[in-house]
Amino acid sequence: MASINLIEAFQDFKDAENIDRPTMMKVVEDVFKTLLRKKFGSDENFDVIVNAEKGDLEIIRRRMIVEDGEVMDPLAEVAYTDAIKIEPDFEVGEELYEEVDILDFGRRAILAAKQTLASRISDLKKNVLLKKYSDRVGDIISAEVYQVWKKEVLLLDDENNELILPKSEQIPQDYFKKGENVRAVVRRVDMKNNTPVIILSRTSPEFLAKLLEIEVPEIFDGLITIRKIVREPGERAKVAVESFDDRIDPVGACVGMKGSRIHGIVRELKNENIDVINYTTNIQLLIQRSLTPAKISYMELDNDKKHAEVYLKADQISLAIGRRGVNIKLACELTGYDIDVYRENEGEEEEFDIDMDEFTDEIEGWIIEELKRVGCDTARSVLNLTADELERRTDLERETIEEVRRILQEEFDRE
């Protein structure tokens, strides 16, 4: 039987499961019709039959049987004498179907066909990959870590397509091991050397939005909408949400009973503090909510210049500014206003301080709770006590106390 096994002859064929069969068959057919045109000058009287399941290929040649000496077109007609050599029962006027042996094309032509087919399959794969992920930009996906490099991580999806998670799109506390599954959002699809490069992100606001959509059914169903998300990856995020149903509390729905819905997201984002606030068109109220957890005394607004002067009590200043100024920076991004923070009573001199809850990423929660138990709820209140005094008042070990003091002091040295 003059057939060729495509799975053996064309290795890429079996690797092309993500290409639909009709497209695949059309490509194979086109490649061999090109081969026929080169050998015979035309492919009109040839049928290329591809068996996609087995990977077999047959080329059938059709010619009309005519009287001897009356052959006008050798491609479309065959003499009666030549026809009965193939099958004695043939008669003039019948069609002769003859199988073409692939080997008749010659080794060089077959090799060229293999290369052409491999190239066409490669292009098809690229187009399929490009379309698949271009349609999924902004969607969350799960992929397996294949290789970890200094500047990026290579991941594989369930079809073994390569995905890239650059260092700039990783949360600072991210640590990946080969073989583990990682969730990220498809940020964009770049073209590099005519090959699609799928870029993932764990730092974009879209990633947090998709995580909320998964955890909060009301967002998925459209009852609650996310108006804006701002993030300082790994540190803090602020999410403004709004409900279309007056019976639903958007903040409560997002946080869940005892924080059940938000806790999973916080863990995924490496303990990133997430402030969920109720969106409002009242800019004064929005600024007040955006500076959570600080409590504002009063504020002065300049809507033309989009500037706000916020006045707080001395113990609320550090909460409003946040560690490394993250809280106020995110509040500015969320509201679109430049926010300046002032003490409510300017006559009082108060040192800049930082709430102990701002250190949860470096100091374990139970240690912070133990310090709060003895009245040390800010960084300076801890530093104002000697290590001996802290050791006497708390149940903490000396080594732990020294480490906590070092972390707090470094923070003030940075300011």
Image (cartoon, rainbow, N blue to C red):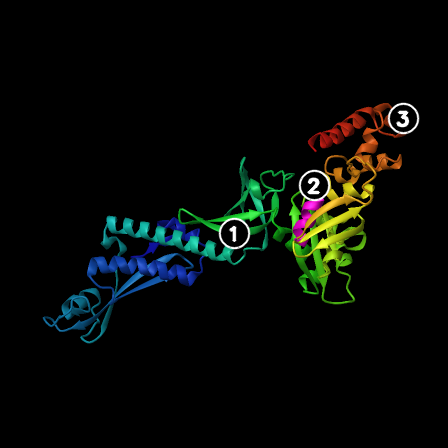
Circle 1 — which element?
strand
- Dot 1, how many residues are within 10 Å of its Cα: few (below 14), some (14-19), or many (20+)? some
Identify which amino acid the numbered label 2 is placed on.
Gly
Question: Residue 414's image quarter?
Answer: top right
Task: Considering the whole magenta stretch, tell me its main secondary structure.
Answer: helix
Circle 2 — which element?
helix
- Dot 3, how many residues are within 10 Å of its Cα: few (below 14), some (14-19), or many (20+)? few
Task: Identify the magenta region.
Answer: 326-336
- Dot 2, how many residues are within 10 Å of its Cα: few (below 14), some (14-19), or many (20+)? few
Identify which amino acid the numbered label 1 is placed on.
Arg
Taking 145 as reference, is 215 above or below it?
A: below
Quickly name the residue at label 3.
392
Q: Visible in this render: residue 90?
A: yes
Quickly name the residue at label 1.
188
- Going from N to C along the chain, the mark reached first, 3 or 1, is 1
Asked if labels 3 and 2 touch by Cβ distance under 8 angstroms, the answer is: no
Q: Residue 330: within the magenta?
A: yes
Q: What is the CA distance from the residue labelled 2 to the residue labelled 1?
A: 30 Å
Question: Residue 347's image quarter?
Answer: top right
Quickly name the residue at label 2.
325
Q: Report x, y in % for residue 310.
A: 75, 49
- Going from N to C along the chain, the mark reached first, 2 or 3, is 2
